Image (cartoon, coloured by chain):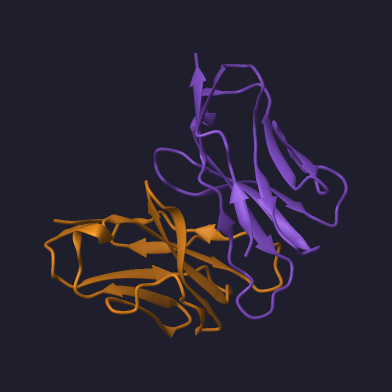
């Protein structure tokens, strides 16, 4: 059963610490998305990759956030240093260019920054 | 930029009854896709139904159907015979039909929380 895998599921950390979230997209999917979900802002796109190249990271705070795809099976989202306002659920999603259009989501990583 | 609006933050329905969730969107594009996603308390985002803008026929998936009004830019979701398992947040989403640079992302509405009353 193909699915997007995200780790960790939950993370509690202190302000100022580095946080790394990982995502394994569905095999064969060449686009990967990072979304952040909060009560106030809803679902916001942070970054988007196609064939491992970043296409849109306009929603990502550049001073502390970074997103990469070291290879086709791994996407990472890093926050350094973390702040309490970064507390949210972070979703990774993947899709295949030219496919039906929907995104397949992971279960999300709930981040709490104290 | 495209926007998606869900004007009903919360809805409730009696079990076995029918409920309709509203969604409107704004776009200047002629080719696009619309989606409804369900997010239960487990927080997993689950695709409920998809509609291609070029198709005049409304999409249907079992108890779920849409009313797609392209001219009005409206895309409502009807849930028939509501079940307790339908309780969730429902998000309407838009995607461009032009998959060139940066257009494959989904733009989401703010969601509607659906409660099922036993």
Residue A20, how many percent across, how many down? 26, 72
Residue A77, how many percent across, how many down? 34, 73
Please indicate, yes or no, whether residue A110 appears anywhere in the rendered image.
no
The residue closer to the viewer here, A111 or A82, is A82
Disc tally is: 0
The residue closer to the viewer here, A1 or A50, is A50
Give the quadrant of residue A104: bottom right
Horizontal side, residue A114 vs residue B47: left or right: left
Q: Looking at this view, name the residue that lies furthest to the right.
A: B56
Q: Is residue B2 above or below residue B99?
A: above
Quadrant of the frame with the N terminus of chain B: bottom right
Q: Is residue B63 above or below residue B116?
A: below
The residue closer to the viewer here, A6 or A67, is A67
Horizontal side, residue A62 vs residue B8: left or right: left
What color is chain B drawn in? purple
Give the quadrant of residue A100: bottom right
Residue A35, how many percent across, how many down? 44, 62
Q: Residue visible at 64% across and 81% down?
A: B101
Q: Is residue A79 above or below residue B82?
A: below
Q: Residue visible at 45% across and 77% down?
A: A73
What color is chain A drawn in? orange
Please indicate, yes or no, whether residue B56 appears anywhere in the rendered image.
yes
């Amino acid at each position: 059963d193909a699915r997007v895998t995200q780790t960790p599921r939950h993370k509690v950390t202190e302000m100022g610490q580095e946080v790394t979230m990982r995502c394994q997209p569905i095999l064969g999917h060449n686009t990967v998305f990072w979304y952040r979900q909060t009560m106030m802002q809803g679902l916001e796109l942070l970054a988007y990759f196609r064939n491992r190249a970043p296409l849109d990271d306009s929603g990502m705070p550049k001073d502390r956030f970074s997103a990469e795809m070291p290879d086709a099976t791994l996407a990472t989202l890093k926050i350094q240093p973390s702040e309490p306002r970064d507390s949210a659920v972070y979703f990774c999603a993947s899709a295949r260019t030219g496919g039906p259009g929907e995104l397949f989501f992971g279960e999300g990583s709930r981040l709490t920054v104290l | 930029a495209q926007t998606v609006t869900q004007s009903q933050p919360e809805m409730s329905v009696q079990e076995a009854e029918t409920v309709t969730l509203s969604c409107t969107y704004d776009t200047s594009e002629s080719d696009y896709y619309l989606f409804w996603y369900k997010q239960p308390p487990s927080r997993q985002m689950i695709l409920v139904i998809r509609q291609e803008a070029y198709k005049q026929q409304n999409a249907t998936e079992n108890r779920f159907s849409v009313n797609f009004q392209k001219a009005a830019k409206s895309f409502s979701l009807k849930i028939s015979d509501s079940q307790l398992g339908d309780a969730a947040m429902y998000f309407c989403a838009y995607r461009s039909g032009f998959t060139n640079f940066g257009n494959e992302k989904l733009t989401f509405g703010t969601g509607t929380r659906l409660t099922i009353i036993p």
